[in-house]
């Protein structure tokens, strides 16, 4: 909307009708089409107006008289104002003077009138015989016009006003001088009367001659009456009539052509004068084709203002043709308004054009309803398209894998980097919603805010709110039906219209996992929610999207942790058995580190995507049910790892290291991984958990420790079965090799331990070295269990011996003493100084002779110490190995 026009100058300031007036000012329109009204002294001068610039207009004054304002009306600025005025007056003119208006000449007929005009026109002397006071006039012509609006100071004018004349020429003349002037005027009039008689006296001869001539003419007329007829003009009349008939006959064609030419000239004059109206239908067609609707509306409004009340038939016909084109334009604009998609600016422009064209209905409300229906329809169409594709893909999974692969290969399909159809549906649906919904809301706000210049129906406000809520609900329900259908009301009769989607296809179970796709979905919906917050929507639509975000966040958390549990299981199943040495612990595989990385990344992702609330989102930390699911799923991840470690030792895969080629080493590595996880991984996970701001999850960690302890015991049991049982199994055959008999009286006095004892020591060294190589922390536990099992086996074997000879008793006691000496350093670190081999030694009884003879007892002890000393001397290197390992 522009500024109103202001007229600040006019030249000339007065004139008769038809005067060419130059108008100057500011904001006088942007072009000829912007000028819709021009009044000069209350006369409409628009048809003669010539727009030069926004500061200058040239026009012809109208027939009005007196002083008045110059008012300009523009479409852009409205009604203007002025600071100057124009005075119109009518000149006293004769029949031979040109005039721009019609002059009634009836009162000008007669010679005397012409003489009067001529005398008056050149009157310069003062009729009072006084000097005219031309210098220093006190009253201006404008002031006199205001005092005597119907008078004039012109002596020859019909509306001559003596007061005007006296104020104009004698406002400073004294009263006595005016009386003298009146006496002069009277004498002058009397003198003119006496002058007529003097004129007759001076020309008496000429007057008598004229009288004689008139008498002669009278005699001749009377004579002619006697000679001819009483009516002297009858023959003359007949002659004139005959001449007229002959003239009409001679000039009939010429007169017809003249009439035709006059009619044509008059028609051309009318066409030229009203060329705007007659060119209006063609101009409307041209501008409609060029889509210049503003110019069409301006031309139509101008024509209605100028010729709306005309009674001329031809004008009415032209207006009817223009009205028909305007009606067609209304239909085109209404159809274009309801054709979607369409930009908001274009919709507002069409609505404004329809209102200017005086459309009967409410185009703004019709556009709102149409846009609401279009947006709902497009969203459902998007759902139908992707749902059908998803169902086809789901049915394709029933094909034989080889056939399906061959079909995709033939069609050139590569699904490695393809986006799942359901993700494409969400992105396209969100794009439709973000692109169309703001226009619907903004158009409604403009409608109820009065920006569209249409009649606003306040009762429609609630209906519009319902439409907005319905659109947002459709968007929310479509997403729920495709990704989290369990959050919908399954008993609702409208449940099926939002889509019954098949289970997630294989594209959701790729290497990235379903959780990553849900993160992408959540990010898309959050972006849309941020855009809706900027629109200042009511609470109900925002709550619908907020509830959707809450359910998506919860489901995303579950998906991420479920995927993390699957990934943990995958890590366990793909154990590489590549050794990594950890200072202070020993050798482990990459599995614990991979498990820690997987858990930290998953917890970080869950924190950033779900628990970290954005603008106006609910806080999941305050939801007990969500925290319960979090605890359960984290516990599941930890349990999968704990139970998976036990299964890794049973796998058939071997590592890149040649050391990892037997089940016993795998069991030791599994035990080492288990210990490393409990000692290092779980505390670090707990610290990371607190750092991320999660609530206390000690129960999950405690459950994980219990599971790891259970796994540790199971692995230790299996290791004993794999490693120790074979060692124990060879003790008995080695002890009774060569049909050795403990009760043989022919046995020589023993000087050394038997070979099975040395074999036991060597086996202990082998186990000790193997465990120390993998995980030194396990040496105490493993060797202690081996020693106890060996001692228990020896106890069983000695228990089964029915009798011992004297030398057999010495040999058995020496063997147990040597084994006790070999394991002395190891057993001292168990926290229990009880000798496990002492129980086996008690199974070897002392004979009655030996127990009653003190000397024999000394000899027995001396021989026993000698055997143990010999054993220590000969097995010094082996004993050092056990002692070194113990240290």
Image (tube, grey):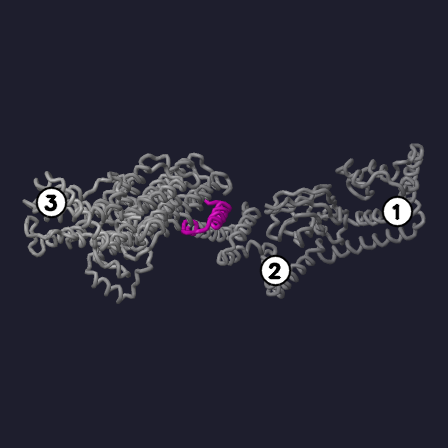
Label 1 neighbour load within 10 Å: few <14, some 14-19, many 20+ = few
Q: Residues within 10 Å of mark 2 (few under 14, many from 20)?
A: few
Residue situated in front as seen by the camera: 267 or 21:
21
Residue on which disc 1 sits:
124
The quadrant where residue 628 appears: top left
The residue wearing badge 3 is 796
Image x and y of residue 473, in percent: 35, 41
Q: Position of residue 212 (x, y in %)?
A: 86, 53
In terms of depth relative to the viewer, which is nearer, 582 or 172? 582
Q: Nearer the viewer, mark 2 or mark 3?
A: 3
Cα distance in 3D space between marks 2 and 3:
147 Å
For the residues carrying marks 1 and 3, which lies nearer the camera in this image?
Answer: 3
Q: Is residue 98 above or below residue 185?
A: below
Q: Position of residue 564 (x, y in %)?
A: 31, 48
Give the camera-side residue of 629 and 328.
Answer: 629
For marks 2 and 3 on the same chain, the one whose residue lies earlier in the sequence? 2
Is 601 covered by the magenta stretch? Answer: no
* Label disc, if present, on residue 265 of the rendered structure: 2
Query: Which disc, if any, is residue 663?
Result: none
Label 1 or label 2, whichever comes before in sequence order: 1
**Considering only vertical position in the picture, is 64 above or below 425?**
above
The secondary structure type at the circle numbered 1 is: loop
Specify the segment rendered in magenta. Answer: 335-360
Q: Identify which residue is drawn at 19% across, 60% down.
A: 400
SS for dot 2: helix
For this view, does 2 lie left or right of residue 207? left
Looking at the rendered structure, the secondary structure element under dot 3 is helix
């Amino acid at each position: 909307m522009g500024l109103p026009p202001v007229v600040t100058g006019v030249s000339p300031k007065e004139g008769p009708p038809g005067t060419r007036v130059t108008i100057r000012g500011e904001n006088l329109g942007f072009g000829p089409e912007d000028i819709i009204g021009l009044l000069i002294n209350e006369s409409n001068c628009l048809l003669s107006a010539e727009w030069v610039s926004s500061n200058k207009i040239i026009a012809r004054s109208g027939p009005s008289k007196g002083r008045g304002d110059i008012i300009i009306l523009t479409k852009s600025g409205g009604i203007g104002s002025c600071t100057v005025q124009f005075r119109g007056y009518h000149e006293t003119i004769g029949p031979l003077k040109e005039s721009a208006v019609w002059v009634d000449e009836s009162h000008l007929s007669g010679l005397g009138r012409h003489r009067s005009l001529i005398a008056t026109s050149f009157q310069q002397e003062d009729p009072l015989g006084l000097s005219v006071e031309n210098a220093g006039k006190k009253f201006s012509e404008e002031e006199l016009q205001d005092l005597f609006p119907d008078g004039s100071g012109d002596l020859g004018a019909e509306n001559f006003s003596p007061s005007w004349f006296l104020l104009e020429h004698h406002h400073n003349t004294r009263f006595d001088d005016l009386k003298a002037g009146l006496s002069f005027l009277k004498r002058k009039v009397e003198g003119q009367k006496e002058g007529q008689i003097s004129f007759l006296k001076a020309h008496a001869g000429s007057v008598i001659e004229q009288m004689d001539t008139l008498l002669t003419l009278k005699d001749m007329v009377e004579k002619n009456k006697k000679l001819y007829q009483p009516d002297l003009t009858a023959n003359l009349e007949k002659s004139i009539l005959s001449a007229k008939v002959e003239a009409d006959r001679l000039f009939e064609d010429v007169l017809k052509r003249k009439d035709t030419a006059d009619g044509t000239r008059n028609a051309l004059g009318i066409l030229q004068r009203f060329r705007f109206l007659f060119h209006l239908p063609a101009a409307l067609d041209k501008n409609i084709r060029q889509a210049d609707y503003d110019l069409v509306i301006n031309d139509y409004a101008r024509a209605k203002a100028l010729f709306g009340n005309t009674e001329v038939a031809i004008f009415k016909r032209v207006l009817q043709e223009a009205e028909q084109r305007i009606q067609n334009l209304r239909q085109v604009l209404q159809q274009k308004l309801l054709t979607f998609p369409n930009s908001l600016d274009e919709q507002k422009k069409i609505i404004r054009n329809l209102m200017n064209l005086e459309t009967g209905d409410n185009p703004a409300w019709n556009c709102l309803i149409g846009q609401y229906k279009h947006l709902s329809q497009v969203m459902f169409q998007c759902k139908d398209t992707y749902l059908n594709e998803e169902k086809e893909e789901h049915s394709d999974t029933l094909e034989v894998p080889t056939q399906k692969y061959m079909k995709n290969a033939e069609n050139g399909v590569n699904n490695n980097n393809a986006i799942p159809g359901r993700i494409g549906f969400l992105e396209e649906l969100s794009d439709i919603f973000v692109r169309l919904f703001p226009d619907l809301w903004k158009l409604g706000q403009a409608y109820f805010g009065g920006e569209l210049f249409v009649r606003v129906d306040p009762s429609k406000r609630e209906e519009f709110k319902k439409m907005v809520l319905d659109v947002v609900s459709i968007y929310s329900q479509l997403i729920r039906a495709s990704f989290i259908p369990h959050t919908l009301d399954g008993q609702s009769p409208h449940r099926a219209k939002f889509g019954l989607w098949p289970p997630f296809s294989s594209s959701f179970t790729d290497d990235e996992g379903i959780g990553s796709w849900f993160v992408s979905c959540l990010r898309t919906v959050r972006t849309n929610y941020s855009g809706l917050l900027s629109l200042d929507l009511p609470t109900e639509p925002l709550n619908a999207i907020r509830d959707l975000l809450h359910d998506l966040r919860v489901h995303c958390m579950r998906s991420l942790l479920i995927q993390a549990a699957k990934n943990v299981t995958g890590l366990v199943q793909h154990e590489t058995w590549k050794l990594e040495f950890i200072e202070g612990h020993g050798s482990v595989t990459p599995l614990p580190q991979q498990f820690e990385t997987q858990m930290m990344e998953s917890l970080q992702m869950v924190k950033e995507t779900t628990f970290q609330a954005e603008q106006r989102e609910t806080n999941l930390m305050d939801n007990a049910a969500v925290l319960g699911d979090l605890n359960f799923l984290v516990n599941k991840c930890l349990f999968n790892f704990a139970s998976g470690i036990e299964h890794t030792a049973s796998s058939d895969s071997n590592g890149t290291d040649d050391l990892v080629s037997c089940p016993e080493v795998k069991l030791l590595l599994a035990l080492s991984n288990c210990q490393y996880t409990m000692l290092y991984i779980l505390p670090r996970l707990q610290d990371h958990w607190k750092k991320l701001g999660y609530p206390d999850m000690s129960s999950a960690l405690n459950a994980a420790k219990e599971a790891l302890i259970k796994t540790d015991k199971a692995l230790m049991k299996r290791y004993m079965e794999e490693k120790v049982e074979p060692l124990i199994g060879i003790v008995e055959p080695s002890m009774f090799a060569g049909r050795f008999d403990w009760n043989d009286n022919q046995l020589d006095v023993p000087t050394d331990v038997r070979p099975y004892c040395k074999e036991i020591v060597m086996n202990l060294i082998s186990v000790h070295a193997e465990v120390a190589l993998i995980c030194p922390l396990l040496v105490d536990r493993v060797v202690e269990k081996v020693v106890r099992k060996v001692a228990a086996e020896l106890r069983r074997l000695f228990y089964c011996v029915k009798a011992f000879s004297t030398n057999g008793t010495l040999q058995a006691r020496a063997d147990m003493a040597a084994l006790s000496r070999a394991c002395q350093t190891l057993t001292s670190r168990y926290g229990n100084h009880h000798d496990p081999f002492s129980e086996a030694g008690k199974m070897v009884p002392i004979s009655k002779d030996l127990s009653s003879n003190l000397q024999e007892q000394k000899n027995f002890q001396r021989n026993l110490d000698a055997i143990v000393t010999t054993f220590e001397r000969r097995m010094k290197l082996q004993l050092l190995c056990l002692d070194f390992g113990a240290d």
